[in-house]
Amino acid sequence: LAKTTQPISMDSYEGQEVNITCSHNNIATNDYITWYQQFPSQGPRFIIQGYKTKVTNEVASLFIPADRKSSTLSLPRVSLSDTAVYYCLVGDEGAAGNKLTFGGGTRVLVKP
Amino acid sequence: GAVVSQHPSRVICKSGTSVKIECRSLDFQATTMFWYRQFPKQSLMLMATSNEGSKATYEQGVEKDKFLINHASLTLSTLTVTSAHPEDSSFYICSARGLAGLPSTDTQYFGPGTRLTVL
């Protein structure tokens, strides 16, 4: 399983764009990159998933360079309710029984 | 779509009793379900992986006789904490991964978690 490295914490202000970069140097060919958001005392919530280049949905964008050794989650115009822990995970979830290994995550604090 | 529920959301029990936690995929069939444990201010730790109709695969250091997992159908998995002790107090979270295309097999969807407190 590819190991991931993320910053422990980030502070931001309402209305700003937040970019969280995750390193995954030993990502395998079949691995996808998935980001989850977790609020206290809740289960993680799926944000976005990608394999290469750029993926965008109504919540966030995910930028993946050609070498796929890192990825950046971009949250546009954050609000106070975006304060949470964000996890970057890498794995071949398409493989039967394959599992996710959670790293430490990035604690994002959005200030007024 | 892709909703996973857990029951109960919160449970308090006495030391030595057993507690069962249910995990259900409400709008899709889950070929694989996962159980995690999370202590305060820490990340999620995978406990076991279960596939419908077969025995669960436990992570190293997780006692399979203490944490009994049953994946009886494509929509239900249960975790039973047997003879619970205060050190088992934690936040237990399940996740489910669907059949091909319903939803994507590349994504796990998580339940809301169950807070277990053992007195």
Image (cartoon, rainbow, N blue to C red):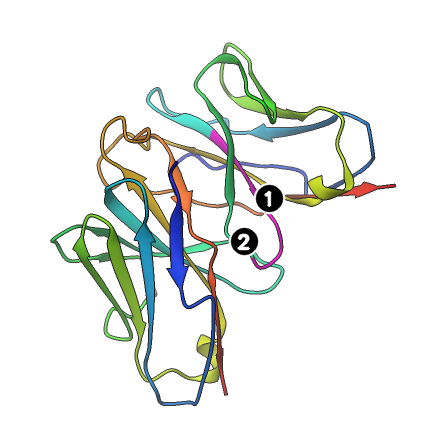
User: Is residue B21 visible in the rendered structure shown here?
Assistant: yes
Q: Which mark is residue B43?
A: 2
The residue shown at (56%, 23%) is A71
Task: Give above or below for B26 relative to A32.
Answer: below
Which is nearer the eye, A31 or A25? A31
Where in the figure is residue B43, as x and y percent of width and height? 54, 53
Which amino acid type is marked by label 2? Ser
Q: Quadrant of the C terminus of chain A?
A: top right
* Quarter of the image where one finds residue A79: top right
Please state if B33 lies on the left or on the right of A72 as rendered. Answer: left
Please state if A24 lies on the left or on the right of B67 as rendered. Answer: right
Give, as a single range, the part of the protein colored magenta: A34-41
Q: Secondary structure at mark 1?
A: loop
Q: Secondary structure at mark 2?
A: loop
Residue that mark 1 sits on: A105
Which amino acid type is marked by label 1? Gly
Are marks 1 and 2 in one subunit?
no
Which is nearer the eye, B27 or A109? B27
- Based on the picture, tell me whether residue B14 belongs to the magenta stretch: no
Q: Residues within 10 Å of mark 1 (few under 14, many from 20)?
A: many
